[in-house]
Amino acid sequence: MAAEDPTIAHAVDAALLKRIAENGAKDALAKHGGGGHPPGMDDLERRVGRLETILDQMVPTLARIDERLKAVATKDDLASVRQDISKVGERVAKVEGAVDKLPTTLHLLGFIVSVLALAGIAKFLHL
């Protein structure tokens, strides 16, 4: 809100004082916007009523927003998920290490051929 120009305020005050001196306080205040309401406040009830109507219309929307915000993840929730993902990553790495140590198909075929070869040699030698 801009500050009032002191010369304008002084001129208004001077004009009000002149009216009070000439016509009496009640008449001067009525012409100057008195009568219990500051100037421009005559439609205050209508304006407040309009604001109350708008607020009444906003309440359901705000309630829906509030409900949706309850389902939004917080920073703590995200930090917890990150920790869980990190733990899963560590477990996957352990499983991959264990899988790498398992014999491959080629290793198994080589073992089977070796056993068969030894069995054949044993049969040949009658052991």
Image (cartoon, rainbow, N blue to C red):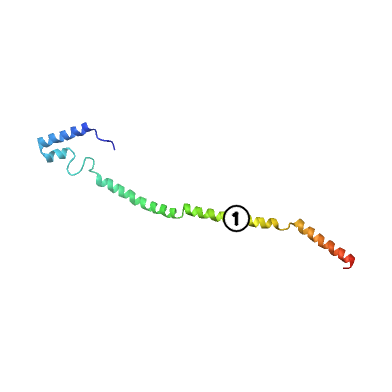
Residue at 52% x, 54% y is 81
Residue at 13% x, 39% y is 27
125 on left or right of 8: right
- The image shows residue 7 at horizontal and vertical percentages of 21, 31
61 on left or right of 33: right
Please identify the quarter of the rendering in which residue 93 is found: bottom right
Please identify the quarter of the rendering in which residue 100 is found: bottom right
Q: Which residue is at the front of the view, 49 or 64?
A: 64
- The image shows residue 11 at horizontal and vertical percentages of 18, 32
Residue labelled with disc 1 = 90
Q: Secondary structure at mark 1?
A: helix
Residue 107 is at least partly visible in this image: yes
Q: Which residue is at the front of the view, 122 or 30?
A: 122
Quadrant into which the N terminus falls: top left
- 124 w.r.t. 5: above or below: below
- The image shows residue 55 at horizontal and vertical percentages of 33, 50
Q: Residues within 10 Å of mark 1 (few under 14, many from 20)?
A: few
